[in-house]
Amino acid sequence: MEITAELVRGAVEIERTETGVRPHRLPEWARRQADAQLERVEAQPAGVRIVFRSAATRVTLAARAERFGYVGVPLRAPGVFDVLVDGELVASASLSSAVQILRDLTTGEITRSEAEPEELTFELGVSGGVERLVEIWLPYSESVELISIDADEPLAPAHRPAPTWVHYGSSISQGSNAASAATIWTAVAARLGGVELTNLGFGGSALLDPFVARTIRDLPADLISVKVGINIVNADLMRRRAFAPALHGFLDVIRDGHPDTPLLLVTPLWSPIFEHTPGPGAFDPDALSRGETRFVAAGDPAEVRSGKLDLATIRADIDRVVHDRSASDPNLFQLDGMALYGASDAQSHPLPDDLHPDAATHRLLGERFAEEVFGVEGAIPTTR
């Protein structure tokens, strides 16, 4: 059967293609204002899922993926689709082939292969005759064109009783290094908090773009969180003079559409390479020579005195922005990212590439965020 917008949650827009539909996390007008990096990652459907009620025991999804990589850099593993039945993970699978897009970092040349759609069949691990809530979470690391979905019993759209949480962040929020689609920290936190997730985590692109603020302004939202800082530093995008006004402007636009919605600012997680060293960030050439992917900070710590940004400076400036706004905005809250992942966590949960958390740490982040934000004594308690 055809996949309709009624079955898709977490997408901002659904693009109709010649053979199916493609979920997007930014609207078409915003994509026209984005650069190539953001265009690529917004089409990777982090947090997007197909949701329905059915008495089915087996579901088949036809899809085609696009995977992006760099020549000379180890390729990511294929993205993982997760299937949840009544909130429990019952099956996972990856497409065996995909359109492969490779960029040569030395020449800028891009090559593209082609691939045909493929079917994934999921056994739901339940007996027939009982209607259940089924969610198919789409991969966070590859663009997906959805062709069709079929099952051994009829599928029906599910209603949406939960509050909607719109979250803006970087590649860590998008899912980098998580094990699969439903185990990203944002997905873990959403399930624990009993909220409906719209994930606007954009790898390398949490850069306070005005068109993203306008997108959030126009989305339905009961809760909004903005986790910002790491991409500002590792992109070496702006100096200290520009950061606080840009953050104020981003929040002002959101408040134009959500004047009273609980709004949470999250400071950066601990990141050893950027704590006291500004960007830009780069691939570690020694690691690449060993066939590994690791990152380094290529800036000079001395440049912080002349206005370059490191994470310690970013945190101080976010504190100041919250302080300046809080008197007139009682629904503005702040969460210290170091409470989610701090220096003391490095021994038990080291960052495998010196920048992104691994699968176990994603789960830890989700659990801590849910407790800090959605818990009974959290910043924005939710009712389950």
Image (cartoon, rainbow, N blue to C red):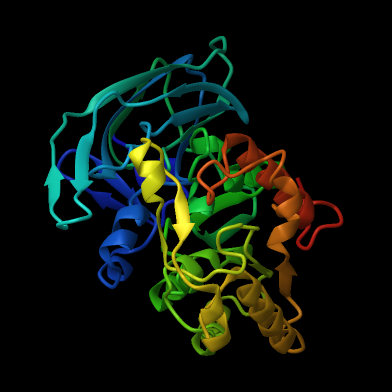
Q: Which residue extends farthest top?
A: 127
Total numbered badges shown on the rendered structure: 0
- Foreground residue, 348 or 57? 348
Please, is residue 309 above or below residue 146 in the view? below
Residue beneath the point at 34% across and 63% down: 27
User: In the rendered image of this protein, does residue 356 appear above or below residue 36?
Assistant: above
Q: Quadrant of the C terminus?
A: top right
Give how far across and how far down residue 347 sits, in percent. 71, 41
Figure quadrant of residue 42: bottom left
Residue 99 location, x and y as percent? 20, 37
Residue 150 vs 28, above or below: the answer is: above
Q: Say which of 335 and 161 sits in front.
A: 335
In the image: residue 277, left or right of residue 161: left
Query: Which corner quadrant of the image does residue 335 belong to?
Result: bottom right
On the image, the x and y values in percent for residue 313 come to 63, 77
Query: What residue do we see at 42% from left, 38% from top?
Result: 138
Residue drawn at 41 percent across, 57 percent down: 12
Q: Nearer the viewer, residue 103 or 64?
A: 103
Picture residue at 46% right of the left edge, 40% below the top: 49
Residue 247 seen in this snapshot: no
Q: Is residue 17 visible?
A: yes
Indicate the position of residue 38 as horizontal and vertical percent values.
34, 61
Q: State left or right for residue 19 relative to residue 122.
A: left
Q: In this rendering, would 263 be left or right of 117? A: right
- Quadrant assignment for the N terminus: top left
